[in-house]
Amino acid sequence: MKSYSWGRGLAAALFFAVPAAHADVSFYAEGAVGFASTADFEDTINSGYPFADSSMPVDIGGSTFNLAAPPLEADDYNVGGNLFVGMRFNDYMAVELMYLTYSEFSSEYRKTLVEVDEDNIPVDTLPVNLSGNMDVSGFGLGGRLDFPLTDTFGVFGRVGMYEWQQEVTYSGNVIGLLTASTSNPTNTLRTGNESGFDMYAAVGAKMRVHRQTSIYVELNMADFGEDEFATSAMGMFFGVHYDFSGTGFGPDQTTNTKRATENDTRAMTACDPKYKDINGIACE
């Protein structure tokens, strides 16, 4: 696949220039894996098949088989993953870099062709197979909003723009049979090796399990591809969020602690030795 044209410069600008201007920002990282599905992948992989309009007689060992374009049947789900590294400006707003990957949306076709004579009696057979696979990955930049509900639970949403890389591969003896008489016989064809920009979005919920660590579930959607290979993927992902400062999930500090951190002082209380009541019972 092609390399990302802007990722390194963007990462450097985002994570070195901005913190210098905003000393109070905090950083986090998270990663997730899950299942993704494309509702139209089966149509996409069939319409992009380079021999979709072919119906070719193929001679194998003296037997002639009519090799029409096979209907590929696609898997309903595949495994995907994503990684985020972000800067949080407060309890609610953050900007983040994103990497996602969908590995091998796949489709298969297996069938045994039969040659018959003029009396419609089978005289020979030919097993054929074909698979279509699509790999997608992307690198992008987006914004995130968090809405803490309690000190433990919260919901979030994110949206951004990313550069996707897509590669579609067809392989199997069907390809070999159809290209056998050409100048470049092969069992594998790669097409749809493209890149472009599109949107991604997600909504989710997370639960704090440690001061700096949360687990989360999110529903995300990403568009990718062009022309006959344009499609969308929707996934349910489960992941772990780690906040390097431990303050990125909403309030988890008392007023005294915050004041001590920000002003190197703490709020005065009735239990300070100088001001507490004479017998000190209320402060025991």
Image (cartoon, rainbow, N blue to C red):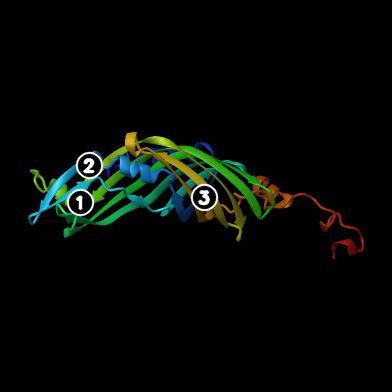
User: Looking at the picture, does residue 122 appear above or below residue 261?
Assistant: below
In depth, the one of 101 and 264 nearer the eye is: 101
Horizontal arrangement in the rendering, residue 125 relative to residue 225 (left or right): left
- Specify which label sits upstream in the sequence, 3 or 2: 3
Of labels 3 and 1, the one closer to you: 1
Q: What is the spatial separation of the Cα atoms under label 3 and label 1, in whole angstroms?
A: 49 Å
Circle on res. 222: none
Contact? badges 2 and 1 (CB < 8 Å):
yes
Note whether residue 23 is visible: no
Instruction: Please state which amino acid type lies under the numbered disc 1.
Output: Val
Q: Which element is circle 1 on?
A: helix
Instruction: Please state which amino acid type lies under the numbered disc 2.
Output: Phe
Q: How crowded is mark 3: few (under 14 residues within 10 Å), some or many (20 or more)?
A: many
Q: Give x and y (percent) for residue 270.
A: 85, 54
Tell me the quarter of the image containing the C terminus: bottom right
Q: Give x and y (percent) for residue 5.
A: 32, 37
Q: Give x and y (percent) for residue 65.
A: 16, 51
As drawn, the residue found furthest toward the front would be 119
Count every numbered label the image shows and give the total.
3
In depth, the one of 236 and 124 nearer the eye is: 124
Instruction: Please state which amino acid type lies under the numbered disc 3.
Output: Tyr
Q: Name the residue under label 2.
A: 51
Q: How crowded is mark 2: few (under 14 residues within 10 Å), some or many (20 or more)?
A: some
Q: Name the residue under label 1.
A: 174
Circle on res. 28: 3
Of labels 3 and 2, the one closer to you: 2
Q: What is the spatial separation of the Cα atoms under label 3 and label 2, in whole angstroms?
A: 48 Å
Tell me the quarter of the image containing the N terminus: top left
Q: How crowded is mark 1: few (under 14 residues within 10 Å), some or many (20 or more)?
A: many
Note whether residue 153 is visible: yes
